[in-house]
């Protein structure tokens, strides 16, 4: 259910927690904001203070029962990058770099990283690391893993397009050379492109790798204990782990959606979950014995125009954005758990130069929280100038989920306000997921009510989606100056300079309304009130959150 990458690899599936609120700058605080109050008052996402972590745990647990919204399709993230699989596997497998709870990035299995020039990355590998079968991690395993990730048929293949060569250059050394300087690649190594596999185990399992009954082939603080398809999946503490020993000895995962998930958490049948749906988080607000922790994320709710052409004209896209009632969507569709937002990237992506990105977010045009009379007048004029055919409906693709239904109705209402027709096409969730990847599946819709996130704490991890040749540039946006500036930013290693370029790129993107941003919400951790420790930020998809789970009291 996850679609990960800075392209499709960053798309989020139906209902994954969308983005972060501007207050993500509170990353220096010691614990995540939590809600333990009684009642079920509607939240106001704009007023939530987001922090990346919860208070450190003090006591051990024999077992924690954790909920996922789906059973993983596979635990091979090269072939099936689902969010459910990632929530499990991030405790079992490790990456060359690691995304931190505050959304910064640091070396992990690569103990040291050096850049002798701007086209070379030299990784010195950590010694004393063993896979769960007891064999040592070697440079050969690392190089083999990188080459597997780089296969164009694998989920992470597009992260390696700028690689000139990858070689073993020492007993514990890998040297990577680039065709051009690459500011994003080391951040990709903190995502699934940096997972290190046990070459021998993966090859031995063959096509069955990642399925029930197969070993995990990883080095992390937990190892896969059992996977009973249709019932549960268990991980247990790996006693020979090279790093700090986890407080929780075992985590048992089960899966439930919607009301079943809410009931399990409310009754104490489960100890915690990362609430992938904002509606789940809203339903759990104020339940006794439960705390909600809100943290930074990178994702957003977006409208993505398609190849069909109903929103081909940028003037019509701008008009729709001006007429859209984002505040109404937040209240009616998501219990106040989303915040109207003007860019396609949540503020958890502001891993550097935060004041620059925050100021740029506030300055975005064409994206009011609620349309004013002047906004509507401007929108109607844009439609008039475009010469759009008012008789032909713009078809909105959605599924039957509450949030997307509200968004689709809000889009139709916005179109009506500016003299255009909207028509809603509702499909099953399984079919909706095909909209993201299959042009034929979306051939009959003009715009998709979608979600998206990026694994990198850098907005430039997103904006290549609008390059002229991007597979995610469905509407066919073409701007040679945009293409040139994106490529320059991706090759700019200096953070301050890259941030300046990114802000200009963001303005070009939002002014053209290549995608129409709707809202962001926090990452939400729901936890038994007696427990604490895991990160609250979107880093939970890439960081060993279970290794920090434990009891509040020692």
Image: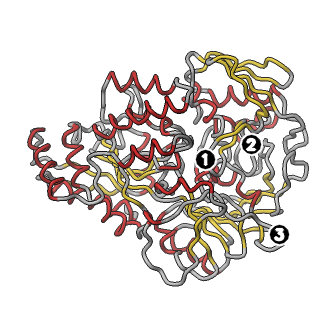
Q: CA distance from mark 2 to mark 1?
A: 16 Å
Q: Are marks 2 and 3 in contact (CB under 8 Å)?
A: no
Residue 406: percent from the left, percent from the top?
Answer: 32, 63
Other residues around mark 1 within 10 Å, as few (<14) / some (14–19) / many (≥20): many
Does residue 435 appear in this view? no
Secondary structure at numbered mark 3: loop
Mark 2 lies on residue = 94
State the mark number for residue 103: 1
Other residues around mark 2 within 10 Å, as few (<14) / some (14–19) / many (≥20): many
Q: CA distance from mark 1 to mark 3?
A: 26 Å
Residue 27: percent from the left, percent from the top?
Answer: 59, 54
Q: Closer to the observer: label 2 or label 3?
A: 3
Which quadrant would residue 54 be assigned to in this image? bottom right
Does residue 483 appear in this view? yes
Secondary structure at numbered mark 1: loop
State the mark number for residue 59: 3
State the mark number for residue 414: none
Q: Earlier in the sequence, mark 1 or mark 3?
A: 3
Which quadrant would residue 163 be assigned to in this image? top right
Q: Residue at x 74, y 63 (%)?
A: 56
Other residues around mark 3 within 10 Å, as few (<14) / some (14–19) / many (≥20): some
Q: Closer to the observer: label 2 or label 1?
A: 1
Q: Earlier in the sequence, mark 2 or mark 3?
A: 3
């Amino acid at each position: 259910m996850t679609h990960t990458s800075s392209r499709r690899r960053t798309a989020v599936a139906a209902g994954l927690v969308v983005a972060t609120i501007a207050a993500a700058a509170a990353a220096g605080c010691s614990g995540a904001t939590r809600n333990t109050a009684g009642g079920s008052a509607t939240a106001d996402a704009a007023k939530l203070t987001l922090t990346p972590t919860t208070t450190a745990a003090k006591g051990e647990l024999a077992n924690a029962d954790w909920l996922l919204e789906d059973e993983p399709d596979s635990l091979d993230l090269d072939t099936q990058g689902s969010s459910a699989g990632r929530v499990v596997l991030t405790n079992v497998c490790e990456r060359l770099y690691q995304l931190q709870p505050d959304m910064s990035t640091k070396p992990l299995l690569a103990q040291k990283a050096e850049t002798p020039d701007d086209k070379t990355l030299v990784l010195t590998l950590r010694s004393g690391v063993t896979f769960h079968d007891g064999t040592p991690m070697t440079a050969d395993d690392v190089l083999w893993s990188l080459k597997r990730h780089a296969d164009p048929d694998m989920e992470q293949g597009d992260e390696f397009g700028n690689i000139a060569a990858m070689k073993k250059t020492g007993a514990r050394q890998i040297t990577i050379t680039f065709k051009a300087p690459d500011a994003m690649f080391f951040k990709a190594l903190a995502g699934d492109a940096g997972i290190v596999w046990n070459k021998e185990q993966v090859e031995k399992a063959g096509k069955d790798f990642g399925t029930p009954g197969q070993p995990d082939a990883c080095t992390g603080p937990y190892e896969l204990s059992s996977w009973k398809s249709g019932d549960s999946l268990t991980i247990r503490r790996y006693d020979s782990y090279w790093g700090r020993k986890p407080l929780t000895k075992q985590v048992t995962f089960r899966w439930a959606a919607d009301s079943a998930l809410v009931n399990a958490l409310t009754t104490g049948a489960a100890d915690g979950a990362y609430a992938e749906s904002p509606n789940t988080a809203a339903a759990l607000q104020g339940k006794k014995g439960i705390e909600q922790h809100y943290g930074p994320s990178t994702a957003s709710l977006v409208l993505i125009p398609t190849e069909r052409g109903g929103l081909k004209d940028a003037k019509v896209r701008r008009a729709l954005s001006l007429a859209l009632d984002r505040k109404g969507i937040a209240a009616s569709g998501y219990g106040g758990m989303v915040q109207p937002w003007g860019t396609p990237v949540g503020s958890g992506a502001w891993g550097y130069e935060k004041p620059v990105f925050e100021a740029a977010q506030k300055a975005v045009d064409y994206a009011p929280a609620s349309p004013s009379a002047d906004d509507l007048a401007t929108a109607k004029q844009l439609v008039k100038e475009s010469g759009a055919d008012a008789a032909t409906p713009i078809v909105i693709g959605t599924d039957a989920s509450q949030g997307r239904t509200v968004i689709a109705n809000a889009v139709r209402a916005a179109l009506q306000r500016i003299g255009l027709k909207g028509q809603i096409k509702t499909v099953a969730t399984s079919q909706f997921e095909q909209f993201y990847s299959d042009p034929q599946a979306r051939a009959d819709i003009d715009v998709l009510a979608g979600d998206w996130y990026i694994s990198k704490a850098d907005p430039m991890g997103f904006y290549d989606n609008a390059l002229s040749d991007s597979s995610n540039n469905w509407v066919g946006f073409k701007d040679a100056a945009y293409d040139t500036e994106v490529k320059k930013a991706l090759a700019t290693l200096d953070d301050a300079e890259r941030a300046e370029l990114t802000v200009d790129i963001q303005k070009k993107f939002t002014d053209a309304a290549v995608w129409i941003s709707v809202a962001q919400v926090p990452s939400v951790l729901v936890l038994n009130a007696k427990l604490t420790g895991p990160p609250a930020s979107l880093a939970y998809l890439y960081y060993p959150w279970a290794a920090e789970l434990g009891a509040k009291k020692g």
